[in-house]
Amino acid sequence: MPPVMKQDGRLVVVGGVAAGMSAASRARRLRPDIEIVVLEQGNDVSYGACSLPYYISGVISDRGDLIRYDAEFFRRERRIDVRLGARATRVDPRGRAVAFRSADGPEKTLDYDALVLATGARPVRLPIPGSDLPGVFALRTLDDGDAVRRFLGDRAVERATVVGAGYIGLEMAEALAVRGASVTLLELLPTVLSTYDPDMSAIVERELLDRGIILHKETRVDAFEPRDEEPRVGYVVASGRRFAADLVLVSAGVRPATELASAAGIELGRTGAIRVDRRQVTSEPTVLAAGDCAESPHVVTGRSTWIPLGTTANKHGRIAGENAVGGNVRFGGVAGTNATKVFELEVAQTGLSTAAAGEAAIFADSVKISSTSRSHSYPGAAPLAVKLVFEKQSGRVLGAQIVGREGAAKRVDTVAAALHAGMTVAELAEIDMSYAPPFSPVWDPVLIAASQALKKL
């Protein structure tokens, strides 16, 4: 545990988005006497990065709507010294000091009594020719979103290419299509949404094709090239083909930003993220880590995992902030619960897929059922597919994937709760779920899936 924070001590937080500002705010609530400094290398704090595709599409028109609270609010209302454009350069755990540099300024040093690393994750950059051409973008920060919006506003983008068919890639394919572009989606793997089982991701692929997205799977991007000597991207070279593109969005995944921790001798875990205990404490007792740079225990496997999600970052941050100032709270773990929208589809997942269960050496089985989002007699009832994964011998619920035009995103939370409770499919089948024709059939699709799993057991 970190030493008890002394009276008038100093907490330094590196990173000012979800985890960092959650940590600073929780520490301030518990300890009004201490000094809290947040070093944020960007120009904004506390913004919703998950909303960036909708900001680019125009569904969210005002940039300010993405920012929960600005830096001045934290300075004025919470007495948190937020320093924008301040990039941490070195951490000295033994000397309890962090060095940082502001734009065009000399390196400075801050002593601390406790340090929270909330450095997040950074997008994977493709090490290929043309990656630095104007018109080739990644999407991770609010500044990234601004850059894409400006580019779209300055010129006609008739053809866009999205590299990578994960959540951000699919959301950006939709966003660019909404902006009027013809969109080509290139994916290295055999399916889109690789954390889903192929039979469920196939439903998503059909939606993409029906919406006019040109999809190429098992396609490796080799280079970006300019067109007609113009100083911006014009083509994507991939698997021996050339795709014309006025804009390219690279969404090839993210990696934990651990350079600062690693250089300071702080241990990394098997996933490559910072190893922490359930109190978010690293291998250095005065240093905690939270958010996308840190590992989490998985509620199903019990193993350390790295699943970068905003929900996890906020929870990590609260726990790190409390423990940094003398608390002793623990993180309960993650199930990897997530949801996204792909045009008119809701796509949701929690826990393990059948493939992930096999990788974890769990003898798993699954059922897949088709039902409707509402009572069949009620107008607007839409098809809903539910896949439930369970342990063959014990019947323990391992995970679920739900895809449909409505009712998927929040239904998956029922299964997430079952995972945290360690429930079996028999116990899941007995949950007293609500029923009304506008919202569900009398047998909710999750209950139908649990009942079918019982038959297989």
Image: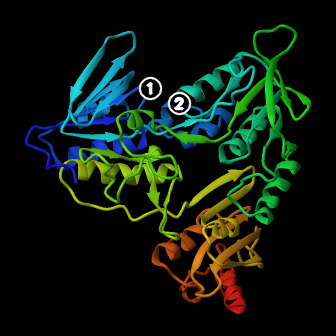
In the orientation shown, which residue stands out farthest toward the top? Answer: 229
The answer to whether any part of residue 381 appears in the image is no
Residue behind mark 1:
42
Q: Relative to residue 190, is residue 242 depicted above or below?
A: above
Kindly give the residue lying farthest to the left in the view shown.
Answer: 7
Q: On the image, numbered disc 2 is attached to which residue?
A: 142
Question: Could you say where residue 248 lies in the image, as x and y percent from the top left?
Answer: 75, 28
Q: Nearer the viewer, mark 2 or mark 1?
A: 1
Q: Are marks 2 and 1 in contact (CB under 8 Å)?
A: yes
Q: Is residue 339 left or right of residue 94?
A: right
The answer to which image quadrant residue 396 occupies is bottom right
The image shows residue 308 at horizontal and vertical percentages of: 52, 49
Look at the picture and state if 270 lies above or below 45.
Answer: below
Return the residue nearer the eye: 286 or 243: 286
Which quadrant is the C terminus positioned in? Answer: bottom right
Identity of the residue drawn at 37% across and 24% down = 89
Query: Vertical placement of 350 versus 66: above or below?
Result: below
Residue 231's image quarter?
top right
Three-letter amino acid code at disc 1? Gly
The kind of residue on which mark 2 rests is Leu
Position in image of residue 66 (x %, y %) = 50, 37
Q: Position of residue 439 (x, y in %)?
A: 64, 73
State the residue in front, 184 or 440. 184
What residue is shown at x 51% (from left), y 46% (from top)? 272
